[in-house]
Image: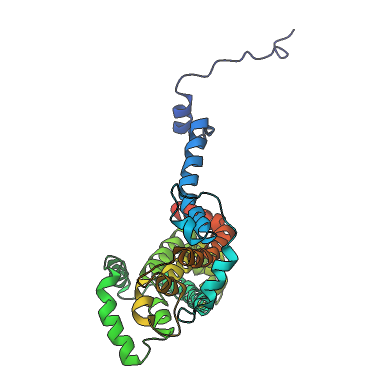
């Protein structure tokens, strides 16, 4: 056998090969997750899903089952009966509250996506006087609790005549400081300055650059911000309770609080309404869960 035909002898991998591969710039192979990792994740998922399952069990049970010891762990057959009682209550307006929540969450989400992406583009790629102090002011507003502005907001809405209407819930949430900051950081890391300058050389206006270049590049961030905004707006309770309580335009969270009010609380009704109000959030999160992870990961790694 000639030297050219002689097979190469396999040499054992040196110790510390993974560290040396990192130092040499080679990507090391990922270590597969073990049994205990999957077991821990499975147990964590069960603990996270148990409150939702328990809510469904109580919403399908009778009054006797809700106070039974040991507690019931299997669903009953009274879900449609309990749901019919919830929707037939004259002083709760539960069906209208779901429609109101869809309207408020949809309008606020669309507005936040537009205004926050537009403001984020301005802070990230446009040069104007006072941009840094303004951005610092936006970041500082994130440190102010929302509870501090409730009284002033109620007075302003009263001056405008919007208290008790959906406008009082929609208008304060049309743009958020977190959305502006998040979109600004994502655009800085995703859209190169050279791309914007080349578009200007070709004669594109600022709005054309925003619409045709920036928006397609930040779709993952828009998906994340949209999902987070929809969930936060749907679950908002304090301000809708203050401005919409006792009116004919409650949101779903206010309607659930009305179900839980009174001297005697019927928990099967409360949890049946809560379960129905949770279903839209589950659908949204199931549809856009992958986009959330993708958008967060792309925004965390600078290109």
Indicate how the structure is coloured in the image.
Answer: rainbow
In the rendered image, the residue lying farthest to the front is: 64
Where's residue 252, x and y in %? 47, 73
Residue 77 in view, yes or no:
yes
Q: Quadrant of residue 282?
A: bottom right
Q: Relative to 299, does residue 144 appear above or below in the rendering?
A: below
Q: Foreground residue, 15 or 204?
A: 15
Q: Foreground residue, 224 or 36?
A: 36
Q: On the rendered structure, is 13 left or right of 141?
A: right
Q: Relative to 78, does residue 201 appear above or below in the rendering?
A: below
Name the residue rendered at 46%, 49% in the picture: 71
Where's residue 219, x and y in %? 54, 64
Where's residue 39, x and y in %? 50, 36
Q: On the rendered structure, is 254 left or right of 89?
A: left
Q: Relative to 96, does residue 51 appear above or below in the rendering?
A: above
Q: Foreground residue, 265 or 48?
A: 265
Where's residue 82, x and y in %? 54, 67
Residue 205 in view, yes or no:
no
Q: Foreground residue, 35 or 131?
A: 35
Q: On the rendered structure, is 60 left or right of 47?
A: right
Q: Quadrant of residue 179?
A: bottom left
In the rendered image, the residue lying farthest to the top is: 1
Name the residue rendered at 51%, 33% in the picture: 28
Q: Quadrant of the N terminus?
A: top right
The total number of labels drawn is 0
């Amino acid at each position: 056998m000639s030297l050219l035909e002689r097979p190469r002898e396999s040499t054992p991998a040196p110790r510390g090969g993974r560290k040396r591969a990192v130092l040499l710039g080679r990507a090391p192979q990922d270590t597969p997750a073990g049994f205990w990792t999957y077991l821990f994740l499975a147990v964590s998922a069960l603990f996270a899903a148990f409150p939702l399952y328990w809510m469904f069990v109580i919403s399908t049970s009778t009054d006797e089952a809700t106070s039974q010891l040991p507690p019931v762990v299997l669903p009953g057959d009274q879900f449609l009966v309990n749901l019919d009682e919830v929707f037939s209550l004259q002083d709760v307006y539960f069906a209208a509250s779901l429609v109101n929540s869809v309207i408020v969450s949809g309008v606020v989400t669309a507005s936040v996506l537009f205004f926050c992406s537009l403001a984020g583009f301005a802070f990230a790629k446009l040069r104007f006087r006072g941009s840094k102090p303004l951005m610092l002011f936006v970041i500082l507003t994130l440190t102010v609790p929302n509870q501090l502005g409730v009284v002033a907001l109620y007075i302003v809405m009263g001056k405008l005549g919007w208290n008790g209407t959906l406008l009082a819930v929609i208008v304060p949430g049309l743009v958020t400081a977190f959305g502006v900051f998040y979109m600004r950081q994502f655009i800085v890391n995703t859209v190169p300055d050279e791309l914007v300058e080349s578009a200007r050389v070709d004669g594109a206006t600022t709005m054309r650059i925003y619409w045709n270049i920036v928006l397609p590049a930040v779709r993952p961030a828009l998906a994340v911000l949209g999902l987070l905004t929809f969930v936060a707006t749907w679950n908002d309770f304090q301000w809708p309770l203050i401005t919409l309580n006792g009116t004919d335009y409650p949101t779903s969270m206010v309607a659930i609080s009305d179900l839980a009010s009174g001297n005697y609380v019927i928990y099967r009704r409360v949890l049946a309404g809560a379960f129905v109000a949770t279903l839209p959030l589950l659908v949204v999160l199931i549809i856009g869960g992958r986009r959330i992870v993708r958008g967060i990961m792309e925004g965390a790694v600078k290109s």
